[in-house]
Image (spheres, grey):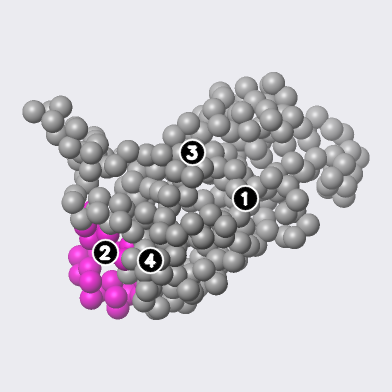
Amino acid sequence: MIVTNEFVMLNLPKTGSSFARAAIKEIYEQRQSKKNVIIKALQRLMFKQFGYYSELILPNIKVAGIESPADQHGTFSQIPRNYLNREIVSIVRNPYSRFMSGYEFRHWEKYPHISKSLLDEHFPNFPNLSVDDYVRLNELRVIHGRLGGKIPKANVGDQTIQFIQMFFKNPRDVINNLTDEYLDSPDIFHDIADIHFLRQEQLVDDLALFLKRHGFSVAEVQYVREMKRVNVTKSYSPDRTRLWTKASIAYIKEKERMLFRILNNSGISYPDMEVVVENQANEST
């Protein structure tokens, strides 16, 4: 996570957080480069007065039972108490496109978050996985990666579990008592922390406006608008829409339904992928 005087940024993977982090860090480093050595030292000692940013690398608490290195993807529950008076911001992405980007990015090939015995049992041709195989891998990752072998009582997907871990006030209690009734209830809106979400689909504009609201200069905001994208997942398919199957669409639509509800409540909505695929098929005929 990135901590500044004005806000704390939480980094949900595969949403464009690498771009946002790089932009913010570069702006603060440019500010510091304009100061002399004495002022630089004072900035580090007097955080609040001079506006020095900090990046916290924290233990990865989102994967249970398997050793996972500390990373930059700290959660709301890990924010040091003395920073909770600042605005909390993060980035979200269409759960459909995030799923497919994850499939093509293939981070799961190096970090499947399930044991080798399970991989051998369910995926004898690993890492050669179809999209439907990737659905099954996500289902196993919920049980054996996110929940440490515990079978959930709720019909829930990997992105939803990760979202609860990232942004809920008491994620452990919520996950331990997760039911379908809870996922479909209004209680979720009380249990999520107060987070300002930027949208990956228009991240440059959203981030620029957010920084402008927090007093960043015209030049700094313009720097964000002109900065090149970073860590972009290469698409191996000329059209990712054609990769979707009935099983993969149903998985996202049903098991990530709580995520869609929270995003809709925040004014962020996405089209049903089943409709998108159908419309594209009609256009091509």
Q: Is residue 227 visible to us here?
A: no
Q: Which residue is mark 4?
A: 180
Query: Which quadrant does the C terminus fall into?
Result: top left
Q: Are marks 1 and 4 in contact (CB under 8 Å)?
A: no
Q: Nearer the viewer, mark 3 or mark 2?
A: 3
Residue sitting nearer the eye, 209 or 168: 168
Vertical placement of 182 versus 237: above or below? below
Given the image, on which type of amino acid does mark 1 rest?
Asp
Given the image, on which type of amino acid does mark 2 rest?
Arg
Q: Is residue 90 visible to us here?
A: yes
Residue sitting nearer the eye, 119 or 94: 94
Tell me the distance, in whole angstroms, between the alpha carbons under discs 4 and 2.
20 Å
Q: Which residue is mark 2?
A: 136
Q: Which residue is mark 1?
A: 194
**Tag of residue 267:** 3
If you read the primary sequence from the N terminus, does the residue marked by circle 4 or circle 2 appear first? Answer: 2
Q: Nearer the viewer, mark 4 or mark 2?
A: 4
What is the secondary structure assignment of the residue under circle 1? loop
Say few, some or many: other residues with alpha carbon within 10 Å of mark 3 (under 14 / 14 to 19 / 20 or more): few
What is the secondary structure assignment of the residue under circle 3? loop
If you read the primary sequence from the N terminus, does the residue marked by circle 3 or circle 2 appear first? Answer: 2
Tell me the distance, in whole angstroms, between the alpha carbons under discs 3 and 2.
31 Å
Tell me the distance, in whole angstroms, between the alpha carbons under discs 1 and 4.
23 Å
Where residue 127 appears, x then y in whole percent?
A: 27, 61
Say few, some or many: other residues with alpha carbon within 10 Å of mark 4 (under 14 / 14 to 19 / 20 or more): some
Say few, some or many: other residues with alpha carbon within 10 Å of mark 1 (under 14 / 14 to 19 / 20 or more): some
What is the secondary structure assignment of the residue under circle 2? helix
Magenta residues? 113-139
If you read the primary sequence from the N terminus, does the residue marked by circle 3 or circle 4 appear first? Answer: 4
Vertical placement of 117 versus 244: above or below? below
Horizontal arrangement in the rendering, residue 78 relative to residue 101 (left or right): right
Vertical placement of 36 versus 57: above or below? above
